Image: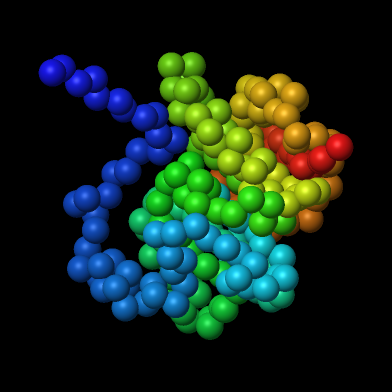
Amino acid sequence: MYKKKIISIKSYVLRCGKNITLLHKYIIKKKFNKFKLNINKYINFKQLFGFKKIVIDIGFGMGDSLINQAINNPNIIYIGIEVYLPGIIRIINILNKNNIKNVKIIIGDAVLILKKFFNNSIDNIQIFFPDPWPKIKHNKRRIIFLSGFIINIIRCLKKEGILHIVTDNKNYALKIINFLENTKLYYIKKKNISRPITKYEQISKKLGNKIWEMIFYKYIY
Ligand SMILES: C[S@@+](CC[C@H](N)C(=O)[O-])C[C@H]1O[C@@H](n2cnc3c(N)ncnc32)[C@H](O)[C@@H]1O
């Protein structure tokens, strides 16, 4: 019988393959274990880390902002999720070299990984400069709008947990604010937020782009 193939839209394109070297494979095999979170089953952060604050960084890129935050806040557990291999290799090397213990890394698609997190278990989810997909025909790849993504964010954030999104794309920013308007995420306009600058942001600022900093609180009546 004819079966229709379902192709799910992804927020990223993987261009690795030929760029994976033996060194990459070695680093992942030998140095990744202590930073790895097993996602074969549901992840219960309370069981793993007790009452420590949990911050998720979706799409950490080259990892500078994540590392910086982790060093400055040793009592917070940071979970980085990324698909971009050069960034993953880089962060594993830095974590090893500096013996940083409060960062865990999950390699893979955040849209799928979020489904594995317990309800009401995360304090803060940060998505700094999600791929803007600026061409109209590619807008459907924007991670925030992918099927089930925001529903899972709301589900796994704690009460009064924070979703922190930053973008340099005005169209994306306005659409996000509009998209989240009738959800449990309440938009707070904040201008001066202290956080380390990201790699993407450095480039964007040099180009003179405006940065949209958006904080949403999860509220429960
Ligand atoms: C524009 S870059 C920004 C990187 C970093 N946050 C920064 O500001 O420098 C977006 C990152 O999100 C990652 N990404 C895109 N979709 C993802 C997904 N579904 N799961 C995990 N990471 C994803 C990409 O690989 C890329 O590294």
Which of the 4 image quarters holds residue 70? bottom right
Q: Is residue 118 left or right of residue 36?
A: right
In the rendered view of the protein, which quadrant contains the N terminus?
Answer: top left
Locate residue 32, reporting x and y percent.
Answer: 39, 72
Q: Which residue is most to the front?
A: 1
Camera-nearest residue between 93 and 160: 160
Q: Residue at x 31, y 78 (%)?
A: 30
Q: Residue at x 59, y 54 (%)?
A: 118
Q: Is residue 32 above or below residue 21?
A: below
Camera-nearest residue between 134 and 207: 134
Which of the 4 image quarters holds residue 215? top right
Residue 60 in view, yes or no: no
Q: Residue at x 43, y 16 (%)?
A: 137
Locate residue 150, reporting x and y percent.
Answer: 60, 35
Q: Residue at x 39, y 59 (%)?
A: 40
Q: Is residue 215 above or below residue 33?
A: above
Camera-nearest residue between 97 and 176: 176
Residue 123 in view, yes or no: yes
